[in-house]
Image: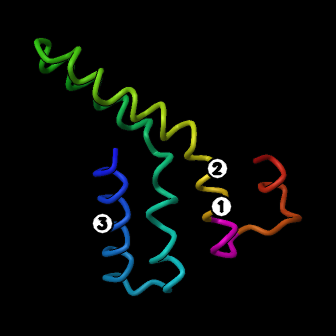
């Protein structure tokens, strides 16, 4: 899980710098991508079909990470959007979180 967090943070920050986005984007884009663990579920199913002998190992490694990131991801995203100035206290998106 740590490798996923570090990879998303460094990779997305590098891409943001390469594309010359604002510094606030560099700092917050990695955390904003963490809730995207649903894609990992689909890829795990596809990998399990392609590698049936390793299906249980893949699931035992990936599923706990999906659960963690889907549980804490929305709160991290809301905090990141708030710190970056993309949402404000009166916005309806903030009230839903």
Q: Pointer 3: what residue?
A: 11
Give x and y (percent) for residue 12.
36, 67
Instruction: Give the label, 2 or 3, closer to the camera.
Output: 2
Label 3 neighbour load within 10 Å: few <14, some 14-19, many 20+ = some
Give x and y (percent) for residue 17.
36, 82
Task: In this rendered view, identify the residue nearer to me: 54 or 6.
Answer: 6
Which mark is on residue 69?
Answer: none
Dot placed on the residue nearer the N-terminal end, 2 or 3: 3
Q: Pointer 1: what residue?
A: 79
Vertical placement of residue 68 versus 57, above or below: below
Along the horizontal axis of the image, is 86 left or right of 23? right
- Asked whether disc 1 touches disc 2, contact meaning CB atoms under 8 Å apart, the reply is yes
Residue at disc 3, secondary structure: helix
Instruction: Give the label, 1 or 3, closer to the camera.
Output: 1
Vertical placement of residue 96 versus 50, above or below: below
Vertical placement of residue 34 versus 64, above or below: below
Along the horizontal axis of the image, is 51 left or right of 78? left
What colour-coding does the image apply?
rainbow
Vertical placement of residue 96 versus 18, above or below: above
Please identify the quadrant where the N terminus is shown.
Answer: top left
- Asked whether disc 1 touches disc 3, contact meaning CB atoms under 8 Å apart, the reply is no
Task: In this rendered view, identify the residue nearer to me: 64 or 93.
Answer: 64
Q: Pointer 2: what residue?
A: 75
Distance between mark 1 and mark 2 Cα atoms: 6 Å
Distance between mark 1 and mark 3 Cα atoms: 20 Å
**Res 49 quadrant in image:** top left
The span shown in magenta is 81-86
In magenta stretch: residue 67: no
**Res 66 quadrant in image:** top left
Dot placed on the residue nearer the N-terminal end, 1 or 3: 3
């Amino acid at each position: 899980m740590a490798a996923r967090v570090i990879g998303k943070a460094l990779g997305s920050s590098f891409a943001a710098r390469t594309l010359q986005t604002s510094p606030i984007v560099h700092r917050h884009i990695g955390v904003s991508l963490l809730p995207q663990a649903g894609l990992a579920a689909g890829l795990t199913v596809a990998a399990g079909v392609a590698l049936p002998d390793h299906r249980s190992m893949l699931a035992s490694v990936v599923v706990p990470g999906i659960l963690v990131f889907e549980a804490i991801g929305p709160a991290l995203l809301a905090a990141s959007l708030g710190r970056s100035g993309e949402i404000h206290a009166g916005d309806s998106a903030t009230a839903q979180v």
